[in-house]
Image (cartoon, helix red, strand yellow):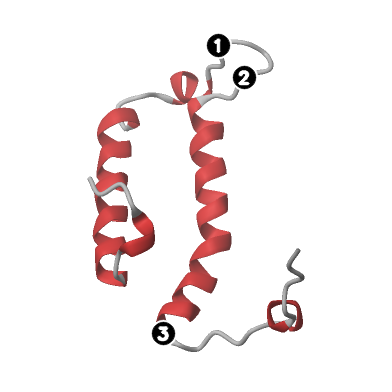
Amino acid sequence: MIQDFTTLTVPQLLAETDVLARDAQATFGHLNAAQLNWKPAPESWSVAQCLDHLLTGNREMLPPMAAAASGTHKASFWESVPCCRA
């Protein structure tokens, strides 16, 4: 698996996400609902909660990434404002 995702092309990123999805399926796909939702401590997250958190983040990030990759991204006002530098 490639570790530095900042230098990958879009096809390489897609290939890496396929690898990650297959790895997650191989690691957790055999667990039943009770196992997926089991928490080692009340303040800990279950496997299902961790996977849901990752999926939620991906749903938020994939549309802007796709827009940037396709060249259709329009910078927001805040993205257009020069940053202050010390």
Residue with the mark numbered 1: 40
Residue with the mark numbered 3: 70
* In this picture, residue 23 sits left or right of residue 83: left
Report x, y in % for residue 86: 76, 63
Residue at the far top in the pictured view: 41
Is label 2 in a helix, a strand or a loop?
Answer: loop
Which residue is painted at 50% across and 56% down in the image? Answer: 58
The residues bearing labels 1 and 2 have C-alpha atoms spaced at a distance of 6 Å
Report x, y in % for residue 14: 29, 63
Q: Amino acid at mark 1?
A: Pro
Which residue is painted at 62% across and 19% down in the image? Answer: 44
Q: Residues within 10 Å of mark 1 (few under 14, many from 20)?
A: few
Q: Quadrant of residue 29?
A: top left
Q: Residues within 10 Å of mark 3 (few under 14, many from 20)?
A: few
Q: Nearer the viewer, residue 28 or 11?
A: 11
Residue with the mark numbered 2: 44
Which residue is painted at 49% across and 19% down in the image? Answer: 34
Q: Are marks 1 and 2 in contact (CB under 8 Å)?
A: yes
- Name the mark nearer the viewer: 3 or 1: 3
